[in-house]
């Protein structure tokens, strides 16, 4: 019986495999600073630099509630899916989020 190496399983190179490591792609994570759930998801898109030049990018959205219980969003841009996945797996739970209300976010989770 053949087994893949652990490092290959942890960091697949195929974009479809990378997304499958996030199953489900949309997810709720516990934020380390604010101790409340945040809702995160990736999206692929393009950034237009001028009329003729576009570049594919990956975006990671973080959604949470403010003190009025309104949804707030932060979006982060990445040139590669691997970088977006890394951010979703480890960094998103450590970033500062403006106007977050941990109490409202806990009381009214996004999903």
Image (cartoon, grey):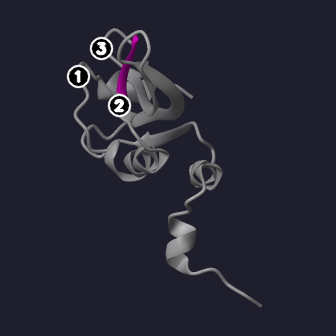
Q: What secondary structure prevails in the magenta region?
A: strand
Question: Do the numbered discs 3 and 1 sit on residues whose CB atoms are within 8 Å?
Answer: no
Mark whose residue sits in front, 3 or 2: 2
User: Dividing the image into 4 quarters, which one contains the C terminus?
Assistant: top right
Q: Earlier in the sequence, mark 2 or mark 1?
A: 2
Secondary element at image label 3:
loop
Mark whose residue sits in front, 2 or 1: 2
On the rendered structure, is 109 left or right of 34? right
Q: Residue at x 23, y 22 (%)?
A: 98
On the rendered structure, is 20 left or right of 84? right
Label 2 packing within 10 angstroms: few (<14), some (14-19), many (20+): few
Q: Kindly identify which numbered label has been placed on residue 76.
A: 2
Per the model, the C-alpha gap separating discs 3 and 1 is 11 Å
User: Dividing the image into 4 quarters, which one contains the N terminus?
Assistant: bottom right
Residue identifier under label 3: 67
Secondary element at image label 1:
loop
Viewer-side residue, 32 vs 46: 46
Per the model, the C-alpha gap separating discs 2 and 1 is 14 Å
Q: Which residues are magenta?
A: 70-75
Mark whose residue sits in front, 3 or 1: 1
Q: Kindly identify which numbered label has been placed on residue 98.
A: 1
Q: Residue at x 39, y 39 (%)?
A: 79
- Rendered image quadrant of residue 29: top left
Q: Earlier in the sequence, mark 3 or mark 2?
A: 3
Per the model, the C-alpha gap separating discs 3 and 2 is 23 Å
């Amino acid at each position: 019986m053949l087994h893949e190496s652990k490092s290959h399983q942890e960091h697949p190179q195929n974009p479809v495999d990378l997304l499958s490591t996030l199953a489900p792609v949309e997810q709720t994570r516990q934020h380390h600073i604010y101790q409340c759930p945040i809702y995160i998801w990736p999206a692929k898109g393009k950034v237009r630099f001028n009329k003729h030049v576009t570049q594919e990018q990956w975006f990671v959205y973080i959604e949470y509630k403010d003190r009025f219980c309104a949804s707030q969003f932060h979006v982060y841009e990445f040139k590669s899916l691997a970088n977006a996945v890394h951010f979703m797996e480890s960094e998103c739970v450590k970033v500062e989020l403006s106007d977050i209300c941990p109490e409202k976010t806990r009381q009214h989770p996004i999903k």
